Amino acid sequence: MIGIITTAVIIAFLILIIIFLISALPLYFAVKLLNGKTTLFKTAIVTLISGIIVSIINFLFRTWGALIAFIILIWIYHEVFRLKWYKAALVWLIHLAFIVVFNFIFGLIATILGITFRSIFWF
């Protein structure tokens, strides 16, 4: 019984890591497109840390949180990926565009396969 639980936990952890790395791909492609210095692991860590920072800022500053978070996110991209300020802002825009395109593609694939939101979440 313990072996089955351990295996399930390991598989769940591996799936979580794979999903996390996939979620870092749009940022990775955007940085590489503008000749930034990064690796997939570095991009995944930046995605994790920036997500936590943006969440905290939006929680603390309800009115101006989005603007403050945007400025800090551009600063993070500027520092970590060694980009000029305008390239860091472009990375943010390209990252957003990649997310929209990836969501459209995955939504289209899910529709073709007959997967709906209701079939994934049963509540």
Image (cartoon, rainbow, N blue to C red):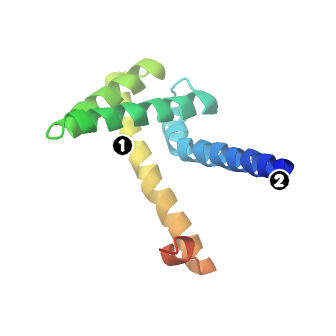
Helix, strand or loop status at disc 1: helix
Q: Residue 21 has which mark?
A: none
Residue 20 placement (x, y as % from top left): 58, 44
Q: What residue did someone put label 2 on?
A: 4
Q: Can residue 74 be seen from the camera position used here?
A: yes
Residue reaching furthest to the left: 63
Which class describes the residues within 10 Å of circle 2: few (<14), some (14-19), or many (20+)? few
| Nearer to me, 95 or 20 | 20
Tell me: residue 121, above or below residue 22.
Answer: below
Q: What residue did someone put label 1 on?
A: 93
Tell me: residue 99, above or below residue 80.
Answer: below
State the residue at coordinates (55%, 23%): 37
Q: Is residue 82 left or right of residue 115?
A: left
Helix, strand or loop status at disc 2: helix
Q: Is residue 79 left or right of residue 43?
A: left
Query: Which residue type does callout 2 highlight?
Result: Ile
Q: Is residue 80 left or right of residue 109?
A: left
Q: Is residue 10 left or right of residue 21?
A: right
| Nearer to me, 60 or 80 | 60
